[in-house]
Amino acid sequence: MPESAMPTHQEPADILQPSAAPADSAITTLYRAALGPMATERYLSRFAHFDHLGRTRPGWNTAASLFTLSWMALRYLWGPALIYVAAAEGLALLVFGVGRAQLQWPDAVHWGLIAVFGLLAFLLPGLFGDAILHTEIRKRIARALAATRTIPEACTLLERQAGSFRRLYGLAGINLLLLAAAIAAYVVVPAEDDSDRRATHTASPAIVATAPASEAAPAMVSASAAQAANDGDAPAPAPAASDEAAPAPAPAAAAWTPPSDASRAVAPPRPASSATTSPPAGALPSSAGSASRSKQRPPPRQAQSPAAAPSAASAALAVVGSTPGYYINVGLFAEEPNARKTQARLLNEGFPAFRQTLKTAKGPRIRVRVGPYASAKEARAAAARIRSLQFEAVVFRQ
């Protein structure tokens, strides 16, 4: 039998052994093009697991948890980013804007809700970041295959929306600029507030010092003029001159009023040679001038006695919060803006709130009080309402 007719025998291993390493499947190639060069192998293993199960499952993605918006911008996930921002702002407005104003919950509940929102803002993107990216990339692959004829053309189209190192560096620079702007705002804004506060403290003593003096000046002048006229040590025309400068001619009549019993008790003892109840002779011409001027303007008001003049001055110098009654201590503040804010909140709620400046060993302090109230029952009811606004309220009687 010739050799050419003899059957040739080949080993099965020679038939089954591939000539080259198997290439990536088409879906893997499309995944690589859509993901880009960053963390590709990690995402490929997660996507293969999702495709094997036929559904997505929660996992953990550190980048999606700590840098949610930046990670979404790097992966071109604009739709999920918009939903994330809208959900965060909507829930914050609903809970902290509307819910807090209506429910009036305490500060512990407020900070607890803030902690829960912060935890969810980091936890949810970290758990579902891989699933969101897988769903979005599957949609991109379907659109790319529908718009092209071959796999390479689809890969070229997918690479345009893939993450890159250049885009990563740009997002990092933007985050650094935002961080620097926030730090600058934190450093500059408090400095401006402190300068405004110092200017307010500097101007306040001058206002407080000049206002009572200007109010008490007319009463002090009238008391001095009446005492001098009774003692006979000053001529009567001096009150007439001040009467021409002032709108009301009340001090002119004080020179002709005989001293009452109260004025004798207040006035110091006079020498025996000068003790008389009649006005000095030199003061008579001023009465004619006063009578002629009285025809042209309304009659003068009855002048106060020297004993009543100090009481008018003391009334002008009365301090807010000195009226007897029941008061409520709300708080003691080191910063004037905080005291003003507390007083404004109480005034808006209908409470008669006022501020008082105190000097302590630690420096000036501003006290906020509410009152006065006529009875302890009214003060306790007001204190209960103030405590519902998350303020302290201590009732005392003055």
Image (cartoon, grey):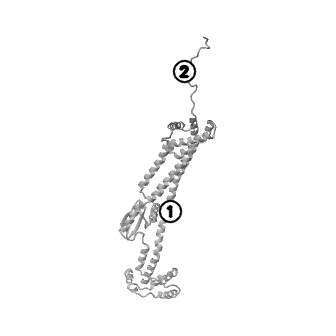
Q: Position of residue 240 (x, y in %)?
A: 49, 83
Residue in the image at 44% along x and 50% along y: 116
Question: Between residues 16 and 125, which one lies in front from this camera angle?
Answer: 16
- Mark yes or no: residue 360 visible: no
Q: Nearer the viewer, mark 2 or mark 1?
A: 2
Residue 166: name its quadrant.
top right
- Image: 349 above or below 184: below
Residue in the image at 63% along x and 41% along y: 147
Mark linked to residue 351: none
For disc 2, the marked residue is: 12
For badge 1, the amino acid type reads Ala
Q: Position of residue 330 (x, y in %)?
A: 40, 63
Q: Quadrant of the N terminus?
A: top right
Q: Residues within 10 Å of mark 1 (few under 14, many from 20)?
A: few
Q: Earlier in the sequence, mark 2 or mark 1?
A: 2
- Image: 310 above or below 15: below
Residue 266: name its quadrant.
bottom left
**Residue closest to the far top:** 1
Q: Quadrant of the C terminus?
A: bottom left
Q: Position of residue 24 (x, y in %)?
A: 57, 32
- Mark yes or no: residue 211 visible: yes
Question: Between residues 57 and 300, which one lies in front from this camera angle?
Answer: 57
Question: Between residues 195 and 223, which one lies in front from this camera angle?
Answer: 195
For badge 2, the amino acid type reads Pro
Mark linked to residue 199: 1
- Image: 274 above or below 41: below
Instruction: Say left or right for 265 vs 87.
Output: left
Instruction: Say left or right for 379 vs 11.
Output: left
Between the C-alphas of marks 2 and 1, the distance is 98 Å
Q: Residues within 10 Å of mark 2 (few under 14, many from 20)?
A: few
SS assignment at label 2: helix
